[in-house]
Image: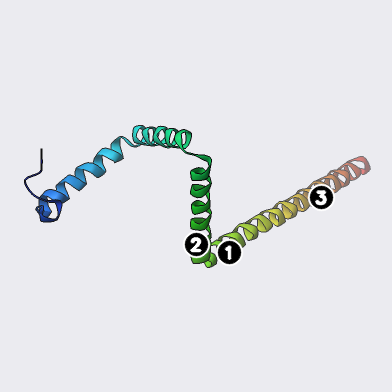
Amino acid sequence: MPHATKPAEEDPEKRALRLRRKRNHYKWHREHEQEKDRKRKRLKRLQSTPEALELEREKHRQAQARYREKNRDKINDGAWKYHQRKKTRHQREKEEAEYQKFIAELEALEEAEMLSTSVVD
């Protein structure tokens, strides 16, 4: 049965209401919708020819390359921050180990000094 109005002629309020309902539906049924999407993709992959799969992979690689090119600074900044955090954490752990060793030596020295003074008394 054809619609009374074409989508382009649709009332903006009705369209907004429909979109809001649609968003809410996906919000509350996200896991179920994702599972349905996975099944659709699996079926599509099984029914596709090897050439079609290779074409899809190539398109994906090109999309990744476009993303990397567009966001190169963001990616490099994230990598730099990751390595800085790793380096800082390693340095902090090293300093903490040195500090603990120093404290242990100091306690051992104080204990030895206390023993030597108690023997003299």
Q: Is residue 82 above or below residue 18?
A: below
Q: Residue at x 20, y 46 (%)?
A: 20
Q: Which mark is residue 106?
A: 3
Furthest toward the right, the residue is 120
Is 57 situated left or right of 106 in this image?
A: left
Give the Cα separation between the discs numbered 2 and 1: 15 Å
Residue type beneath disc 2 = Arg
Percent across and percent down for residue 67 are 49, 60
Q: Residue at x 35, y 32 (%)?
A: 32
Q: Quadrant of the C terminus?
A: top right
| Quarter of the rendering containing residue 8 | bottom left
Tag 3 or tag 2, which sits nearer the N-term? Answer: 2
- Crowding around mark 3 (Cα neighbors within 10 Å: few <14, some 14 to 19, many 20+) is few
Tag 1 or tag 2, which sits nearer the N-term? Answer: 2
- Crowding around mark 2 (Cα neighbors within 10 Å: few <14, some 14 to 19, many 20+) is few
Closest to the observer: 31 or 5? 5
Percent across and percent down for residue 44 are 43, 36
Furthest toward the left, the residue is 4
Q: Residue at x 12, y 55 (%)?
A: 12
Closest to the observer: 98 or 112? 98
Residue type beneath disc 1 = Asn
Percent across and percent down for residue 117 are 89, 45
Q: Which residue is mark 1?
A: 76
Give the SS element for disc 3: helix
Give the Cα separation between the discs numbered 1 and 3: 45 Å
> Which is more foreground, mark 2 or mark 3?
2
Q: Which residue is mark 2?
A: 66
Closest to the observer: 68 or 29? 68
Q: Is residue 64 above or below residue 36?
A: below
| Quarter of the rendering containing residue 9 | bottom left
